[in-house]
Amino acid sequence: MLIRMETFDLLGDPLRMRAYADSAATAYEAEHPGAAADSATEYGEALAYQGRRTAAIAAADRYLAVHPIDGDYLDAVDNAEAVVKVYARAGATTKALDLLDRLLHLPGRLTPGRIRLDPGFAPLRADPRFQHLATSRATGE
């Protein structure tokens, strides 16, 4: 559901994107009653795509509280990258950029080149702080 949600978003089809976001959020809520935000970053992503910004930010915050980055530099960094995208999509730019800055300093797949290309970071691209993060690390600053 999430891949289709993202695909229809990229194709500019908000009706189908929203339908898949609604289905994904409902599925996570049914699978993890009362704890959907604890289980997967994708729940927050589905909420953000639904336009439920406050709920998406709360779900992302909850996910990070239950799954802290410190101590798990393998999976936690990748999952926190998904949280950055939830924050970005939900309009929590400062939270997104603070976490992104932290993640770029940790070992992992996240690089300045990748954040410049990944459509999940598109809501941040116009921000001067994002532009700095996307270029300064690449030049060794």
Image (cartoon, helix red, strand yellow):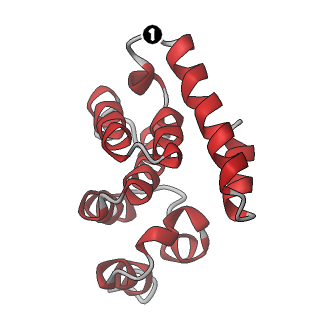
Residue drawn at x 68%, y 38% is: 20
For the point 39% across and 53% down, which residue is it? 90
Q: In the image, 112: left or right of 117?
A: left
Taking depth in this image into account, of 69 and 17 the one nearest to the observer is 17
Q: Which residue is mark 1?
A: 33
Question: Toward which corner of the image does residue 124 lie, by quadrant?
Answer: bottom left
- Specify few, some or many for label 1: CA neighbours under 10 Å numbering under 14, 14-19, or 20 or more: few
Q: Residue 106 falls in which quadrant of the image?
A: bottom left
Q: With 67 as the anchor, is 79 left or right in this view?
A: right
Residue 19 in picture, x, y percent from top left? 67, 39
| Quadrant that contains the N terminus | top right
Q: Kindly indicate the quadrant of the structure image that contains residue 93.
A: bottom left
Using the image as rendered, state which of residue 131 and residue 54 is in the foreground: 54
Q: In the picture shown, does residue 62 fall above or below 69?
A: above
Q: Is residue 80 above or below residue 106?
A: above
Percent position of residue 12, x then y: 70, 65
Q: Amino acid at mark 1?
A: Pro
State the residue in front, 18 or 87. Answer: 18
Does residue 104 appear to the left or right of 50 in the view shown?
A: left
Helix, strand or loop for disc 1:
loop
State whether residue 130 is above or below residue 3.
Answer: below
Look at 54% across and 29% down and name the residue there: 25
Residue 88 in the image: state x and y as whole percent: 40, 60
Quarter that holds the C terminus: bottom left
**Disc count in the image?**
1
Most extreme residue toward the front, as rendered? 15
Instruction: Residue at 47% x, 36% y: name it.
Output: 41
